[in-house]
Every structure is written in C-alpha cells, then in structure tokens.
Image (cartoon, rainbow, N blue to C red):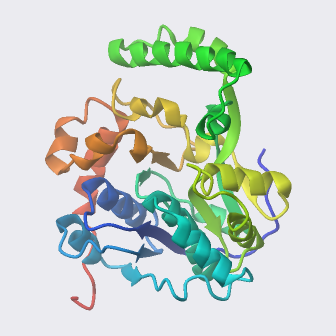
Amino acid sequence: MWHRARVSAIPDRILFVWTGARFPYFARLAVESALLAEPTAEIELHLFGARPDGAPHFEAVRARDRVAIEMIDLDRVFDGLDVDPRALRATFDRLDSPAARANLIRYAVLAHRGGIYLDTDVLVVRSLADLRGCDAFAGEEQVLSIDERRVAGELELDMLAPAAAWAMAWGMRRLDAALGGGRLEPLAQRLDPHWQITQLNNAVIGARPGASFVRRLLARATEVDARIRYRLGPTLISEVARADRRDVTILPSETFYVVPPSYSFRFFTGGAWPIPDATRLLHVVSSNHRALLDGLDEATVRHRAPDGVYYALAAELATHARALPGRRDGS
C-alpha cells in the first residue's frame, strides 16, 4: 500500500514542456494519449527556447481542442515561488543541456499552474484522475544501485559486483526479447536483488499550485551542482523525497515505470505483452532510443505493431486520435 500525502486538489490539467524547432511524432502521440485518457482535462504545452512552429506534428497538436500552447517567459517564470528567483535564473543560465533546463522549467510551471506533468516520451494508457486527490505525487522506478555514483564519475571496486549482476540480467532479458518464450526470465529475476534499488523519477509529477514538495525541489536545485547529468532529475527528486515524505505521495514502480529504464528496449522488441492493471502509462525513455523514436511516423508504428507493445499501442492510439475534435475557435 502506497503512502498518501495530505489531501488537496490537483487541477484537471496535463502539462508538457518542450524546447526545439522539431516536434517528433512520439511527442504528438504523448499529447494525444493524454487527450484520450483524460477527456475532461486541459492540456498545456509549455515552450521555451526554439519553437517548433510549422513542424507538422506540432501543428496537428496545436489544432486539437483542449490543447493550449504557452510560451515560457524566462524573465518571469521563476517569480513568486517562495524561492529566490535570481538564484533559480542563475542556475538555469549555467545549464547547457536542454534536458536539464527542462527539469527546472517543469518544476516552475508545476508550482505556478498545478496539474500533472508528463514527459513527451510517454503513452498514457489509463486515467490518472484519481491521483488528483494527492497534494503532490511521483513514482518509483527500479534502477542500477551504483548509477548515481557512476554518473558522478566514481569508479570503485565495490561497484563491480552490482554492475556484473546487472549486465548478466540485462543480457538474459535481451536474449529473451529476441527469442521469445521468457525462459531466461526466472534466472534474471534471481540477479535483480544484487543490482536493483528503488528511486524516484521526475518524468511524471502531479502537484497542486504552490505545493510544498515542488517548492522544495526548486530550492534544492539552487544548492546542487546542476551540471551533473540527472542531478536536477531523478537524483534531485529522490533526494528531496527522502528528506521528507510528508508532502508527497510515492507510487510504486508499476504505476509509471513498469519497465526499468535500462530495459526500455522491451517496449520495442519481443512482441506485445499484457500491461498490469496498476500501470497508468508507459515511459519509453527517449534518451535511450533517440534515433528510433525520431524516425517514427504513423505508417511505421502500424507496420511494427507486432514487434513491441509501444508500437501496438501507438497504432491503436493513432486510430482513436482521428476522432479527437479540433479547436472550437477554429484557430
């Protein structure tokens, strides 16, 4: 049973953040899956930096009813959050990575607007509406126990055993995905306790406007070395939740991260598989599959539907998305 923080109201709103002149098909699918799964929610796509104006999939999303395109004002987005706006802007300006900058922006947008933030590499398969009774929520995922140390540049002897256990389990599951049948899965499961730990991920976060958990994320972001990979993402949100869990509901891994990030190949290989009843969405980890995801279009996902669960769901989604209404104002 997961722990629920004190009850408050998360608005019926789904938030996305994007930067860049391109807007690939997988991002469109994420937005359309939210429209289908949440038929009363308003969808906000917040842009900063380069805009994808004219990109076909962006224009298709912009044309949908219940979708609002919002441009981030970097001179004001960090104001009024009970955290020093100058420190937040200085942190933002020190960052070179668009992904790291997007981490900081999502926290600020959540603090201002409230709602459920989703990364654009998700497919929503079931409604998240019942989670809106939380003050704030985030989900756990299963990760390599030494990953945070590895990313920080550490290399110690005690890291070898979990790395070896992970590599053997990964190899077994990769072979199973290629051959089918799952005969190696019991052996891989025996290795899991030797490499897995649980941490939070920030690809999905729900919060009411001004939620204390999100304000704590922003405050801590100004204190850490934000240039380290993942430092403003999974590392930050896990650290802040560990310090005090009273203002955040922690959901188990099958809710948002049914497949560990290092096994995200399983979304695209080995055929379709039954999605657990507790699973609300699939997070396919675009950083692991950039070329694959950037090359997708509707014809490709339909052709590959037998290959993996992501393709199968995307093909089904594309069919249902045709019935989504356009903007009532015609703009």
Residue 221 placement (x, y as % from top left): 68, 65
**Above/below status of 121 relative to 156:** below
Q: Quadrant of residue 157?
A: top right
Whether residue 116 is visible to the viewer of this picture, yes or no, is no
**Above/below status of 78 relative to 155:** below
Whether residue 313 is visible to the viewer of this picture, yes or no, is yes
Image quadrant containing the C terminus: bottom left
Seen at 40% across and 82% down, the residue is 70
Residue 122 placement (x, y as % from top left): 43, 52
**Above/below status of 193 relative to 221:** above
Seen at 35% across and 40% down, the residue is 289
Residue 223 placement (x, y as % from top left): 73, 64
Residue at the limit of the structure toward the left, as seen here: 299
Question: How many labels were placed on the picture?
Answer: 0
Image quadrant containing the N terminus: top right
Seen at 21% across and 89% down, the residue is 330
Seen at 68% across and 22% down, the residue is 159
Along the viewing direction, whichever of 287 and 111 lies nearer the viewer: 287
Q: Is residue 317 left or right of residue 255?
A: left
**Above/below status of 297 relative to 154:** below
Q: Is residue 182 left or right of residue 230?
A: left
Q: Is residue 224 left or right of residue 108?
A: right
Q: Quadrant of residue 287?
A: top left
Along the viewing direction, whichever of 92 and 58 lies nearer the viewer: 92
Q: Is residue 237 left or right of residue 105?
A: right
Residue 212 placement (x, y as % from top left): 77, 73
